[in-house]
Amino acid sequence: DQQVKQNSPSLSVQEGRISILNCDYTNSMFDYFLWYKKYPAEGPTFLISISSIKDKNEDGRFTVFLNKSAKHLSLHIVPSQPGDSAVYFCAASEETSGSRLTFGEGTQLTVNP
Amino acid sequence: SAVISQKPSRDICQRGTSLTIQCQVDSQVTMMFWYRQQPGQSLTLIATANQGSEATYESGFVIDKFPISRPNLTFSTLTVSNMSPEDSSIYLCSLGGGENTEAFFGQGTRLTVV
């Protein structure tokens, strides 16, 4: 039972354009959502998060949008840079679970110069 | 944020043997977790490492296969026991600050079982 899904295994965009990575979830108890970036041979690096009481959170070039009714969130990167090329994981947790995370399958983002 | 040191970074092991992975943090943390990332798949939580008591395992993971120790608030180990090629994965230590805070990850241990 995949509670967090990233349906696009890969995404390719041109440098300077917007990258949009999508994530869907099924567990209505999730109330905290995170995005991580992962390079090969490294652990995931936290990027940005959003609480269920918000619908948008912005940090520099990264913005996360949450649509609770649709159980959908997205990560926007603008402008995209070649250094953003990595695997991006969406993750979610329940209020009472502390930092126990359920991850999506990941999306490989490639930003072409 | 805390600095996480995970050892070994990679290993190649014979089937039937066991490997113990260490996770050292440079400050005391309340919550530590162990995850697995099988090839081409997502990260899956194995267990929560509880300080001074038995770890709490997720569905599909058992203590006999993945014994975990957490003797203090800065250190934990995960042992992968009686390994088979299906155990070939990246194993990651992570720590979190509590409810609705981000979890931080070590660099991972890439395990190959031959």
Image: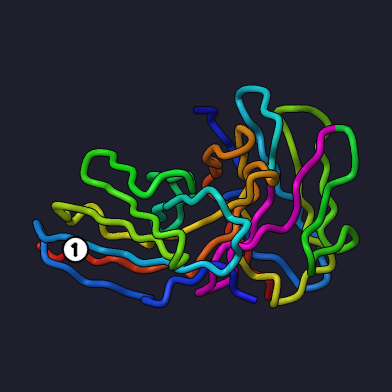
User: Residue A68 placed where, x, y %?
Assistant: 46, 59
Left or right: where A79 falls relative to A29: left
Amino acid type at circle 1 is Val
* Above or below for A7 versus B27: below
User: Residue B34 placed where, x, y %?
Assistant: 68, 51
Q: Residue at x 74, y 27 (%)?
A: B73
| Helix, strand or loop status at disc 1 | strand
Q: Does the magenta stretch include residue B43?
A: yes
Magenta span main SS: strand
Closer to us: B12 or B79: B79
Q: Which residue is drawn at 63% across and 57% down?
A: A29
Q: Residue at x 28, y 39 (%)?
A: A59
Which quadrant of the figure contains the C terminus of chain B?
bottom right
Give the residue number, with chain letter if any, for mark 1. Answer: A111
User: Residue B76 placed where, x, y %?
Assistant: 75, 39
The stretch of residues the image draws in magenta is B33-51
Left or right: where B78 falls relative to A74: right
Examine the rendering and report whether any part of residue A46 can be seen: no
Q: In which quarter of the image is residue A19?
A: bottom left
Q: How crowded is mark 1: few (under 14 residues within 10 Å), some or many (20 or more)?
A: many
* Above or below for B69 versus A40: above
Left or right: where B23 falls relative to B70: left
Outermost residue on the top side: it is B27
Q: In which quarter of the image is residue A16?
A: bottom left
Closer to us: A88 or B20: A88
* Above or below for B97 versus B11: above
* Above or below for B75 versus A31: above
User: Residue B51 placed where, x, y %?
Assistant: 82, 33
Closer to us: B67 or B111: B67
Q: Residue at x 70, y 42 (%)?
A: B22
